[in-house]
Amino acid sequence: MTGSIIINNLAGLLVITSVLTIVVRGVPQSIGILSLQSLVLVMIFFAIGYNFGAHELYTWGITAFVTKVILVPLIMYKSFCKMREANIEGSLIPVWAIIMISAIIVLVCYFVVEPVKLPMITELKPVLAVSLGHFMIGLLCIVSQRNIIKQIFGYCLMENGAHLTLALLAYRVPEIVEVGITTDAIFAVIVMSYFARRIYKVLNTLDANKLNVLKG
């Protein structure tokens, strides 16, 4: 029971770091918070693996630490921190609304997962609710932010939420699948970072609202 409480509390930290990633203005700060969130995710993997005998999650945790905690933030930092417009707020809705919507999302997800009856999920329904809500908060980040870099952060939030959901529902998949799931974020961030840099180089802007005209 104590282990479940710790895991559920760690899941609560995921929500807090998600909201902070969206509302914090500076890109270096957002990258740092995202890296911290990934570290919390790794801690959840190890805690679930230890408390429920899901030793497959140890591989998930090690791979996620290398990719999500170290490599992805490093790639984003080197790609974005020197861009002149990287720290522009560019939010379509105020901070208080983002916080309120995020809380409502997690609450609704909790009621959605209430009927789920699985051995591990019985004690970790708050974690499952957070994992689904985390995905939706990432989507909220994408649709509410004008800054392209912030939208990439939104993708990373969605990916972390989906990763946690898979860890809860399909943790016994073969290890090669686990490694593939945890490394896909690197390739996605590399591709998105490349296009963001190209857009900035050609159009000198990171405002998605200014990219509504195609030029041949």
Image (tube, helix red, strand yellow):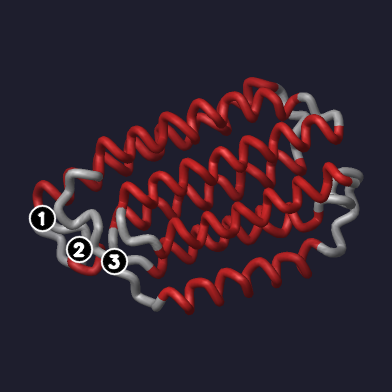
What's the amino acid at mark 2? Leu
Residue 190 to residue 63: above or below: below
Assess disc 1: are there few (<14), some (14-19) or many (≥20) residues with their C-alpha within 10 Å of its C-alpha: few
Q: Nearer the viewer, mark 3 or mark 1?
A: 3
Say which residue appears at 45% left-offset and 51% top-offset. 155
Helix, strand or loop at disc 3? loop
Q: Which mark is residue 211?
A: 2
Q: Please give the count of numbered marks on the rendered protein.
A: 3
Residue indicated by mark 1: 203
Residue 206 to residue 166: above or below: below
Say which residue appears at 63% left-offset and 29% top-offset. 61
What's the amino acid at mark 1? Leu
Helix, strand or loop at disc 2? loop
Residue indicated by mark 3: 89
Q: Looking at the picture, how far across and down is residue 186, in whole percent?
A: 42, 33
**104 sits left or right of 149 in the view:** right
Q: Looking at the picture, how far across and down is residue 177, in whole percent?
A: 63, 26
Q: CA distance from mark 2 to mark 1?
A: 9 Å
